[in-house]
Image (cartoon, rainbow, N blue to C red):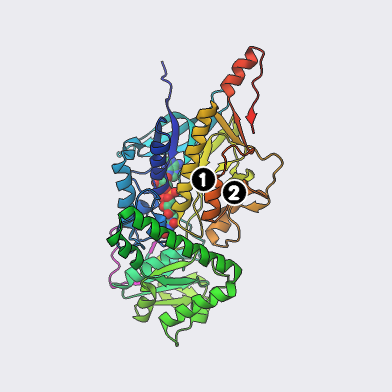
Amino acid sequence: MTRAPQHFDVLIVGAGLSGIGAGWHLQKLCPGKSYVILEQRERIGGTWDLFRYPGIRSDSDMLTMGYSFRPWTLPKSISPGDDIRDYIAGTARDKGIDRNIRFRHQIQRASWSTPDAKWTVEAVRKSPDGSSEPVTLTCNFLFSCAGYYRYSSGYLPEFPNVNRFQGQMIHPQLWPTDLDYAGKRVVVIGSGATAVTLIPAMAKTVAHITMLQRSPTYMISAPARDRIANSLRRVLPAMWAYKLSRWKNLAFLTLFYQLSQRFPKFIKKVLLKRVREQLGPDYDVETHFTPRYNPWAQRLCLVPDADMFEAINSGQASVVTDQIETFTEKGILLKSGKELEADIIVTATGLVMQMLGGIELSVDGQQVDPGKALAYKGVMLSGVPNLASVFGYVNASWTLKADLICNYVCRLLNIMERKGMRQVTPTPNGESAVAPFVERFSSGYVQRAIPNWPKQGQKAPWRVYQNYFRDTFALKWTAIDDGALEFSNPQAEVRSQKSGVRTAVISS
Ligand SMILES: Cc1cc2nc3c(=O)[nH]c(=O)nc-3n(C[C@H](O)[C@H](O)[C@H](O)COP(=O)(O)OP(=O)(O)OC[C@H]3O[C@@H](n4cnc5c(N)ncnc54)[C@H](O)[C@@H]3O)c2cc1C
């Protein structure tokens, strides 16, 4: 006899920052709901457990990247990765969320059945000995907290004659823990947050480290320790101090972003002036630190305590702005004719963006193509019932939006409970796709993937905001039942159809 799969009210994908936050919100706001978290890896932490390259740290402040419900109390607000991992794991432990996690479960497929009003979720459970077995669970609501990129490997462009290189090549996403780089010549390809993080960390012991970039990125230095937040913590209860510091940073970041959108030339001037002050009058800021795009058309690179600029000033690190002609046995030959010799080449070339942790979705036997759907409030997909996913901000801390989405999902579940409705489906009613999921953002990893991501419509609730204040209104303070969500009760309908009475699908 085959046993029915184990059933949960909510199934959360992923035990990273968002998945643990989702568990906390469910326990607090929907205490009657059962939930499980399936995590493909062996540990809690997601990004903050996966990435192990030297110096790994946040590139936004932990006062806005921490959870709204748990104060960040460490002195460094630009925080080392280990501390972020401990913060996430500590939250899971203290609240008993960890008891609901099933590790080594990689979800591959989820199929929605309208007559049953539930998802059937198929996963593969991998044992430490390498063997694996299929696992099937069912749930009423699927909540994807699977992050936004492929875990198995990062993005690697096709470099000419890469196999000729005799040294070691490393991608930061798969950093070998035993890599010995002391006294070595290192070239880092890329100029994003990863390059800017690992270069100052490695510069302390390498012979020399070169950042090779095709084009520059905006950088801004800031103290790793937030003096105001640390002072407030000395005189106020931790939560009060956290909330005040969080609002201070939120207000500053929002103002800075808005000014960048309205007065890009002015903000560009301010940013470049600061870089010149850090690197001195003789440094060629024009070539190496003056991007071709406007501020915030890509994520701004944060340089804590000016460490990247100090590494350059010390002579241990340098920047080369050029293009790769070919790899050679000794390193990289550039279009300019210059050759960069290296023992180690680090390809800080980015991520491969991935929707919903690579899970294949189907609704009543029909495969779902997220690229053809509209995003509802940036949280749900048009035509797909009982599914929500977390995608944070590109211009601010991820967790700000993750918290709002978790809160929203709990409100939605509670409304469904009150209405006695088992199914909720975002229904566009004539709204059509007019914009990509992320707009006015030119970073390569976004541009490569965005055609496969859901689209935005003309107006709310089919818009995806990159603005915490607008989202607070849209996700926290606006009525759930807004006319774009179709609530229904499939089982009740089937029953009443059988008895000759058709129950109306409730949509407001
Ligand atoms: C190097 C790096 C630095 C970053 N720095 C910042 C920063 O400073 N500030 C900021 O706001 N954001 C930053 N980000 C974005 C970052 O991803 C978020 O801060 C945050 O970690 C996202 O949390 P998450 O839980 O949503 O996703 P993740 O951390 O990616 O966690 C997702 C989890 O889901 C699991 N999972 C995925 N697919 C499946 C599946 N099919 N089945 C089962 N489990 C699955 C994964 O194993 C993982 O544990 C950074 C990203 C990177 C890569």
Percent x, y for residue 481? 59, 37
Nearest the camera: 118 or 72? 72
Residue 184 sits inside the magenta stretch: yes
Q: Name the residue that disc number 2 marks.
A: 452
Question: Is 3 in the magenta?
Answer: no
| Amino acid carrying mark 2 in the image | Asn
Magenta range is 169-185
Taking depth in this image into account, of 35 and 28 the one nearest to the observer is: 28
| Residue 153 horizontal/vertical position (percent) | 44, 52
Whole-percent x, y for residue 500 in the image: 67, 13
First in sequence: mark 2 or mark 1?
2
Task: Look at the magenta stretch and give its main secondary structure.
Answer: loop
Q: Quadrant of the C terminus?
A: top right
**Mark drawn on residue 476:** 1
Which disc, if any, is residue 384? Answer: none
Above or below for 348 versus 383: below
> Number of callouts in the render?
2
Quadrant assignment for the N terminus: top left
Q: Which residue reaches farthest bottom? A: 282
- Residue at disc 1, CB closer than 8 Å to ligand 1: no
Closer mark to the observer between disc 2 and disc 1: 1
